Image (spheres, helix red, strand yellow):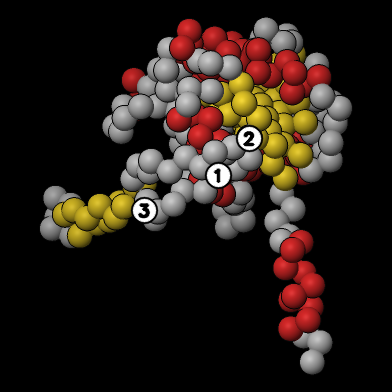
Amino acid sequence: MRILLTNDDGVHAPGLKVLEAIARTLSDDIWIVAPSEEQSGAGHSLTLTRPLRIRKHGEKHFSVTGTPTDAVMMAVGHLMKDAKPDLVLSGVNRGANLAEDVTYSGTVAAAMEGAISGIKSIALSQVYAREAMADAVPFAAAEAWGERVLRPLIAMPASPRLLFNVNFPAIDPDRVKGVRVVRQGFHDIDRTKIIEGTDPRGYRYYWFGLGRSDSAPEGTDLAAIAEDYIAVTPLHYDLTQDGALAATAQAFSD
């Protein structure tokens, strides 16, 4: 099995090293093509206004000066075009990708791009317990449970336009209660924080952040994590709201 690894935290991120260790329990044909710098919050964006550059860091190990989507497109369409991957793994992200945050996530977007290319794709994220942990985020739950979660997903029959979103709770591995397959949740509040400051030259700047929410509707990824389970959510990139098609068509029928 040929596996492509990518992420949105950058090619030197600790979580990517964790993912490589997990992937090597599954195969010895591992490729890494990741953004050269952190691209958190990039979503499913691609670079159209400037050229991309590729840097080789070792055998089957590359970085791309662009987004996670750019990295997967460059891997599938250029670096690996003669023998495309059988599996795309994105992560392990430093921080949760739960509920509507999947729409911002470069980690999930990279897996989505893999799915668009017809490749089984899985996004993996490690939740952390408090803000401002930087590189001190512990990946122990992902390290201990990663292979156990991936093998059943890999064994599933291929399904077009499907990807999986996996989140590991912020607890010690021996406290993880198991795996729950759940739907995507939604936070019940607007968590956006705009942090205002002044730079050394006296100009104002603004920094986006996300506040915490205690919302955890039953049967969702939020509830699974809150209850110390690993959350596995099947996602697809068809955003059509089927339930609204008839009413929308009716609005134009008069």
The quadrant the N terminus occupies is: top right
Circle 2: residue type: Val
Residue closest to the eye, 109 or 64: 109
- Label whose residue precedes the other's in the sequence (1 or 3): 1
Image quadrant in which you'd find residue 170: top left
The quadrant the C terminus occupies is: bottom right
The secondary element bearing badge 1 is classed as loop
What residue do we see at 71% from left, 61% from top?
A: 241
The secondary element bearing badge 3 is classed as strand
Determine whether, in the image, residue 188 is placed left or right of residue 114.
Answer: left
The secondary element bearing badge 2 is classed as loop
What residue do we see at 31% from left, 52% from top?
A: 193
Circle 1: residue type: Gly
Estimate the x, y position of residue 95 in percent, counting from the top left. 44, 31
Q: Which mark is residue 182?
A: 2
Estimate the x, y position of residue 87 in percent, counting from the top left. 75, 26
Circles 1 and 2: CB atoms closer than 8 Å: yes
What residue do we see at 58% from left, 13% from top?
A: 145
Which residue bears the numbered disc 1?
185
Determine whether, in the image, residue 46 is placed left or right of residue 10.
Answer: right
- Label whose residue precedes the other's in the sequence (3 or 2): 2
Q: Nearer the viewer, mark 3 or mark 2?
A: 2
Q: Is residue 145 above or below residue 101?
A: above
Q: Is residue 75 above or below residue 203?
A: above
Determine whether, in the image, residue 38 is placed left or right of residue 116.
Answer: left
Which residue bears the numbered disc 3?
192
For the residues marked 1 and 3, what is the alpha-carbon distance in whole angstroms? 17 Å
What residue do we see at 76% from left, 35% from top?
A: 76
